[in-house]
Image (tube, rainbow, N blue to C red):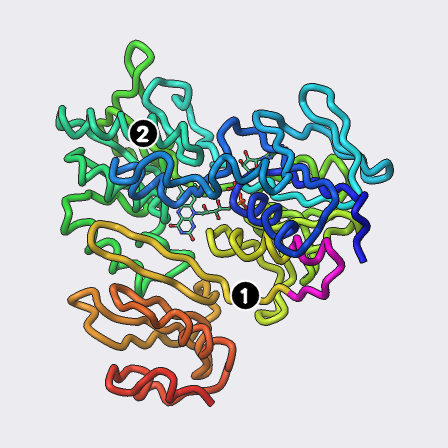
């Protein structure tokens, strides 16, 4: 039984941290809950920052995870605008930027990730942007609106999810957009070449230009302001603004300083945790984008940088902190919206892991499900403008049974009938 006099501290007030705090109370924890975040805003969701909020469709209030009053009502002590700068696992204390020392009985690191920076000349010019925080989205929204008005040109480095979603938003504002991507298709490392072309075609249909097979090597400017980018194949592309969307790096500095096990950057990085989301220190847990967890179902250590993993992983870590037996085995899941295309992806099938891709439905109309298989077993599935099937896809992944691929490809055969 957890003692009512205990103090549980959460570092990081994103989705994982805020949901963990909520769960501690929902599970009946009566001790102190302290949530520390270096951002000044109350905990918020990031997906709208590249979609509805960036497009000016969503109200600012709609991005927050809880009403501001929730924290006081739930007796969650918020330290906003305060970084945790030092962690002492032996003394079980964490020190904040203003010098405040907080003792904990259990600690959750939900420190998330930060955008990778372009390592090229010219990143200090006005007009170079990143997108992670609410303030970034607010700045970018103004930039896209003025590019749209003035027929301006946005160059985006990286055709990953954020690059593509911002490209869609920028086109909606009327800006010219070029995406520079070293791989031959968007999302190459996630969807492979077979399905990456879906997004090439979608964006070309909306007027986006792609520059594949090249890396950005320099951003050039005049009077301190961006005027063009150069790529390693010798191309110069005029630009008024540049978005660096080349991925995110887990924020592991505190864990490293405290001597916790951290996964090598080459292997995806992240704070190493077991299936119960516990780090190499028995009193410290980690969840969300920052954590690389042993995945019981996939038999691999995985760092999942997606909304659903923060939404479910934060609460799972909270339950583990309360002494419950937790084995976090959710099938990785994410979603994206671009123009009129909505999709969900479940599972894990990087290039090299699958030997077949099977589609059911109308690929040309962009209404279909794609399955990635190995030896007839579903590793991952992506439903595109087809809804209420993610649960069944995840069941097929969990079942890990060889399937009749002709039936899998046939929309007339219900997916549930394929379950063993
Ligand atoms: C623009 C954008 C769009 C996205 N869209 C999608 C989508 O469509 N679908 C999807 O599945 N996923 C999407 N994601 C990913 C999803 O938002 C993340 O997976 C999720 O935010 C991770 O939550 P988290 O709580 O682990 O980390 P974060 O949200 O990064 O929160 C961590 C918090 O901890 C703070 N922090 C870090 N270190 C310290 C410290 N030492 N002291 C105090 N505070 C600290 C950070 O500033 C941050 O506020 C998107 C992400 C972005 C940026």
Q: Residue at x 65, y 56 (%)?
A: 27
Marks 2,1: beta carbons within 8 A: no
Within-10-Å neighbours for mark 2: few <14, some 14–19, many 20+ = many
- What label sits on residue 260 in the rendered view? none
Relative vertical location of residue 40 with respect to residue 11 in this rendering, above or below: above
* Residue 215 at x, y percent in the picture: 36, 39
Could you tell me which residue is drawn at 59 percent across and 46 percent down? Answer: 290
In the image, which disc is placed on residue 140? 2
- Residue drawn 20% across the image and 30% down it: 153
As drawn, the residue found furthest toward the front would be: 73
Whether residue 213 sits left or right of residue 111 in the image: it is left
Res 410 quadrant in image:
bottom left
Position in image of residue 61 (x %, y %): 38, 36
When asked about the image quadrant of residue 378, the answer is bottom left
Image point (23%, 57%), residue name: 341
Instruction: Report crowding for label 1: few under 14, some 14 to 19, many 20 or more residues within 10 A (C-alpha).
Output: some
On whether residue 149 falls in the magenta region, the answer is: no
In the picture, measured across the screen, residue 216 lies left or right of residue 240, that is right
246 or 93, which lies in front? Answer: 93
From the image, tell me which residue sits under label 1: 330
> Residue reaching furthest right?
90
- Image coords of residue 105 (percent x, y): 80, 44
Identity of the residue furthest to the top in this view: 223
**What span is in magenta?**
317-327
**In which quarter of the view is residue 197 placed?**
bottom left
Residue 114 visible from this viewpoint: yes
Distance between the alpha carbons at the discs numbered 2 and 1: 33 Å
Q: Is residue 322 magenta?
A: yes
Using the image, determine if residue 270 lies above or below residue 100: below
Residue 313 vertical placement versus 235 (above, below): below
Dot 1: element:
loop
């Amino acid at each position: 039984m957890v003692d009512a006099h205990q103090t549980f501290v959460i570092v990081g007030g994103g989705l994982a941290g805020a949901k963990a705090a909520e769960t501690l109370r929902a599970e009946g924890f009566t001790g102190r809950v302290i949530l520390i975040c270096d951002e000044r805003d109350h905990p918020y969701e990031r997906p709208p920052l590249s979609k509805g909020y960036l497009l000016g469709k969503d109200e600012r209030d709609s991005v927050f995870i809880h009403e501001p009053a929730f924290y006081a009502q739930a007796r969650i002590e918020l330290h906003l605008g305060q970084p945790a700068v030092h962690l002492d696992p032996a003394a079980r204390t964490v020190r904040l930027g203003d010098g405040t020392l907080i003792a904990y009985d259990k600690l959750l690191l939900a420190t998330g990730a930060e955008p990778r920076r372009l390592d090229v000349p010219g990143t200090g010019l006005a007009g170079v942007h990143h997108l992670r925080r609410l303030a970034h989205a607010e700045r970018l929204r103004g930039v896209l609106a003025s590019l749209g008005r003035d027929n301006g040109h946005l160059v985006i480095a990286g055709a990953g999810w954020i690059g593509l979603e911002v490209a869609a938003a920028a086109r909606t504002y009327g800006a010219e957009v070029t995406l520079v991507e070293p791989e031959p298709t968007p999302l190459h490392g996630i969807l492979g070449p077979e399905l990456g072309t879906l997004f090439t075609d979608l964006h070309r249909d909306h007027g986006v230009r792609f520059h594949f097979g090249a890396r950005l090597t320099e951003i050039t400017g005049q009077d301190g302001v961006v005027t063009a980018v150069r790529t390693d194949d010798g191309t110069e592309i005029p630009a008024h603004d540049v978005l660096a969307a080349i991925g995110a790096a887990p924020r592991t500095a505190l864990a490293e300083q405290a001597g916790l096990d951290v996964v090598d950057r080459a292997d995806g990085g992240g704070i190493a945790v077991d299936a119960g989301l516990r780090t190499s220190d028995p009193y410290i847990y980690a969840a969300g984008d920052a954590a690389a967890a042993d995945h019981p179902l996939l038999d691999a250590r995985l760092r999942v940088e997606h909304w659903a993993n923060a939404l479910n992983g934060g609460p799972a870590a909270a339950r583990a902190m309360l002494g419950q037996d937790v084995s976090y085995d959710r099938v990785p899941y994410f979603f994206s919206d671009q123009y009129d295309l909505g999709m969900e992806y479940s599972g894990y099938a990087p290039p090299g892991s699958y030997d077949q891709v099977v589609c059911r439905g109308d690929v040309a109309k962009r209404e279909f499900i794609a399955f990635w298989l190995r030896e007839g077993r579903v590793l991952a599935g992506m439903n595109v403008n087809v809804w209420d099937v993610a649960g069944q896809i995840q069941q097929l992944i969990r079942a890990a049974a060889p399937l009749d691929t002709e039936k899998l490809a046939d929309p007339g055969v219900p997916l549930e009938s394929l379950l063993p």
